[in-house]
Amino acid sequence: MSASLILAAGAIAALVPLGVVARESVDVATATPRFWIALVVAAAGSMGGAVLQQFDGWQTGLGPALSLAIATTVAVFAVVAAFDRSARRLAPMLTVYLVALGVLAVVWQQAPGRPLRSAVFPAWLLIHIAVALVAYGLLTVAAVASGGVVLQERALRRKRPTNFTRRLPAIADGERIQTRLLVAVEILLGVTLATGVVVNRAEGLGWLPIDHKTVLSILAFVVIAGLLLLHSRFGLSGRRGARYGLIAYLLVTLAYPGVKFVTDVLMARGG
């Protein structure tokens, strides 16, 4: 087994304690020491594994990209959980989703990435990558909050709440978390697009390339802007608002991991 596979599998293992604590606790919002210890282990383990995968040079494959996305999401969630008690209730649902992503990261760990044009990363490119990762991490947490709203509304309509939905934030709290995070995501997506212009201009590639990644990112920016506008003007909420948030997440996921899957996995197999 290669070192990258071991690191990716270790990152999944680091998430398990958080999932166990979130599942066992009736109210993770109380944030017991066990919760914080499990969250620190998840953040340190996933980030350590993702960073070590890049130790011998920047890895552009799908597996390492997913590992970085998972690590950033856990770190972002830790910050959000520290300031928002209700957001801590997202831990059960977020952990399940991140473990699923981690399994995909292990499966596609050996998929070759596209070669880098340069072995040296200028500061502006590092800023572009860092901002994009944080934006994706925030959007992932916002999407989980959106999914929680959908599940809570469905359970309320059927009058059959489950142990899982009882652990999630209330509908009003889920909508608030989603909206606040989407505001931050919109700002960071704008910065990502702006730094993308700088990256392309510095490499002599024009302003923004008309490719899948750029088009889908711009569409996500427009969808989030529309959702925030509708929410502020007309009070758009509930499942409809949550679905817009999930659509934005889908667009950004297709823009980066999705494009990587096509270019690094499907096209590589076809070749």
Image (cartoon, grey):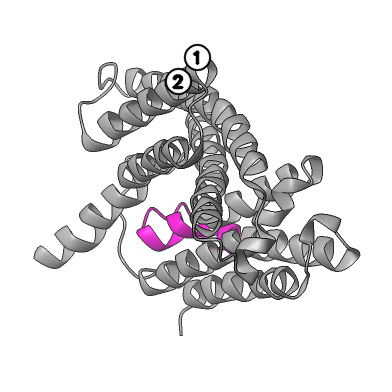
Label 2, residues with CA under 10 Å away: few <14, some 14-19, many ≥20: some
In this rendering, position of residue 70 left or right of residue 80: left
According to the picture, the residue beneath numbered tag 1 turns out to be 233
Residue 224, image x, y percentages = 43, 27
In which image quadrant can residue 210 be found? Answer: top left
Residue 237, image x, y percentages = 51, 33
Q: Is residue 147 magenta?
A: no
According to the picture, the residue beneath numbered tag 2 turns out to be 230
Secondary structure at numbered mark 2: helix
In which image quadrant can residue 74 be found? Answer: bottom right
Q: Is residue 63 magenta?
A: yes
Question: Residue at coordinates 15% horizontally, 67% vertically from top-left?
Answer: 269
- Under mark 1, the amino acid is Arg
Which residue ends up furthest to the right in the rendered image?
33
Q: Is residue 12 among the parts visible in the rendering?
A: yes
Q: Nearer the viewer, residue 225 or 108?
A: 225
Q: Determine whether 225 is above or below 89 in the image.
A: above
Q: Which residues are magenta?
A: 49-68
